[in-house]
Image: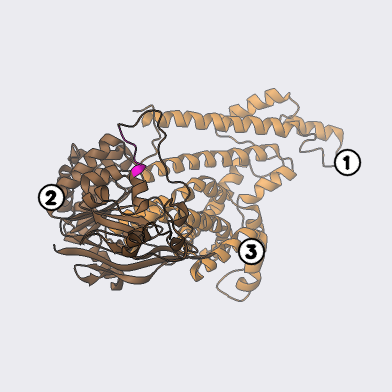
Amino acid sequence: MSKYLLKRLFMSLVTIWAVITITFALMHSVPGDPFRSESKMPPAVYENLLSQYGLDKPVPQQYVIYLGNLLQGDLGASMKSRVETVNDMVERGFPVSAQLGAQALLIAIVFGPALGSLAALYQNKFPDYLSMVIAIIGISVPSFIMGTVLIQFVARNVAYFPIGGWGTWQHTLLPSFALALMPLATMARLMRSSMLEVLNQDYIKTAKSKGIRKSAVILKHAVRNAILPVISILGTTISNLLVGSFVIEKIFGIPGLGRFFVQSISNRDYTLIMGTTIFYAIILVAMLFIVDIAYMLIDPRIKLAKEGR
Amino acid sequence: MEKILEVKDLAVSFKTFFGEVEAVRGISFEVGKKETVAIVGESGCGKSVTANSIMQLLPMPPAFFKNGEILFNGENLLSKSEKEMQNIRGNHIAMIFQDPMTSLNPTMKVGKQIVEGLIKHHGLKHHDAKKKAIEMLDLVAVPQPEKRIEQYPHEFSGGMRQRVMIALAMISDPQLLIADEPTTALDVTVQAQILDLMKSLQERLDMSIILITHDLGVVADTSDKVVVMYAGQIVEQGLTDEIFKETAHPYTQKLLASVPRLDMNRDEALLSIEGTPPDLYIPPKGCAFYDRCDKAMKICKDNMPGFTEHSATHASRCWLNHPMAKTNEGSGI
């Protein structure tokens, strides 16, 4: 097992290194740079800016310098924000996005599989139709519409919910819900189809033939097997939720990490592009690893460490 | 002989998008105490539906009981509530299934799957249930049961899994065991072991067995009585000797003729019954075997034959065996 963990850790580092290298190369292969867009800049100022950020050096040299700084945990200075470094931005934005994401995740994980199971148990009856209508709305309504609708019809009428901004727990409720809807719907649909499949399995019939209660058959025998496909999408879902959504954070005026992903690219803010990408890659790789372990704990047929035996 | 189970005029249908499928069309048979009754027939003739009807494990809807009774110790199972059935299932009637590879929960330890039933039906504490589970595995000759109960089904071979299934079925000393093709998915040597095991448990526990199979070799070895089903009906039933030696129905005759024999020539083609069973969306008005029977007569097409009794225990459903047919032999009907 520990051998597997070490191997896995090494592979994760290689993956992150590959992400860094490819992003770096792609970023520099696009014509232009962070400062060229600002027109009417005197050439001397432009030259000075380039040399201050090290952009006058050859790209391979910049890459080596960047990697060196990165190894010391320094993501560099933002090229657009004159007051904050990239580390500052991540440190400020991530806790906000992560709280929002974690709450959304909780909503999605509690209600998604439950709704899906309910739909499967009452296949082609009212609960099924209701769950699937919710799921289809969740998948097909874009989050910016959902966010706007929530502000217009809920926040404006119920004083408890602020319209936007960040500060108290009430501020987090509507955006968490808006953020949760899509993964909730995906999980519900996935759970419904896998539950239908599991309910037709022989071992469910065996469990029933033992004479145990129907609720025990479902909770102890069906759900654990049916939840496996849902677990497998959790890695990407969790990391997407944790690093924040540009759209939801914009609509509700939340100072999260989400906006940096978009701003960095439109501003050609090289260090911020690298910083956000690396941060996302690290979270994703870590989550996929955790999900693989969870998978093994739930399904004993899956052994992570084949060579360990 | 004391009767354990009596199926009377049982008819089961499935509602589908295209209409009603009459899977079982009015069957009656009895199972006596300590008796083994084999239900034979080809795939899709209603054997498993019959078995699942007794356990009431059919999905309802689409399945529904159209007619008949299933009397277990004189009580009609079809009028029992789900709660009452839960007390009967696994306690008085137990069932094992065709494919041991899929009939155990892959994500639950084998021991826990046995313990579950013990806790339900005997109210045992977890610790005692575990001890009893080890005894049960020992009873069905699973080696090293203390170690084995901590393992998952994928760590067992097919034969061992079927033994676990039998242990599961045996936890409450059931009066009736329904075995739905218990050996079909196993290789021949393991098959013999499993059948021997069932036989020895039957003697020890005085239980009755309904054995569903399409393997007539298994039937000859193990059963006291045979029920031959075709297209949702019983076409012939009798004591095993009567079915094998005084075969009365053309379908049974063909089934027996299709069994490969060791004394056959190597270049001799294996016999098979041409055609397929009729579609049960619109069951035929007359004899269901009409299309495939080489002894079919005019009357068979539109008139359903009744049962002709050959002895107190042996009956068949064929116009050829009708008393009038014998007297008219050769007259061109």
Residue beneath label 1, please?
A: A40
Of the 4 image quadrants, the one containing the N terminus of chain B is: bottom left
Q: Looking at the picture, how far across and down is residue A220, in whole percent?
A: 33, 55
Chain containing the residue with disc 2: B
A129 relative to A31 in the view: left or right: left
Residue beneath label 2, please?
A: B203
Residue A303, compared with residue B291, is above or below; it is above
Residue type indicated by callout 1: Lys
Q: Residue at x 35, y 66 (%)?
A: B306
* Range of residues picked out in magenta: B257-262
How packed mark 3 is, by other alpha carbons closer than 10 Å (few <14, some 14-19, many 20 or more), is many
The quarter of the picture where residue B100 lies is top left
Q: Report the Cα–Cα distance between label 1 and label 2.
A: 101 Å
Chain containing the residue with disc 1: A
Q: Residue at x 25, y 48 (%)?
A: B245
Residue beneath label 3, please?
A: A146
Do marks 1 and 2 share a subunit? no
- Tag 2 near tag 3, CB within 8 Å: no
Residue type indicated by callout 2: Glu
The chain that appears brown in the image is B
Nearest the viewer among B139 and B305 is B305
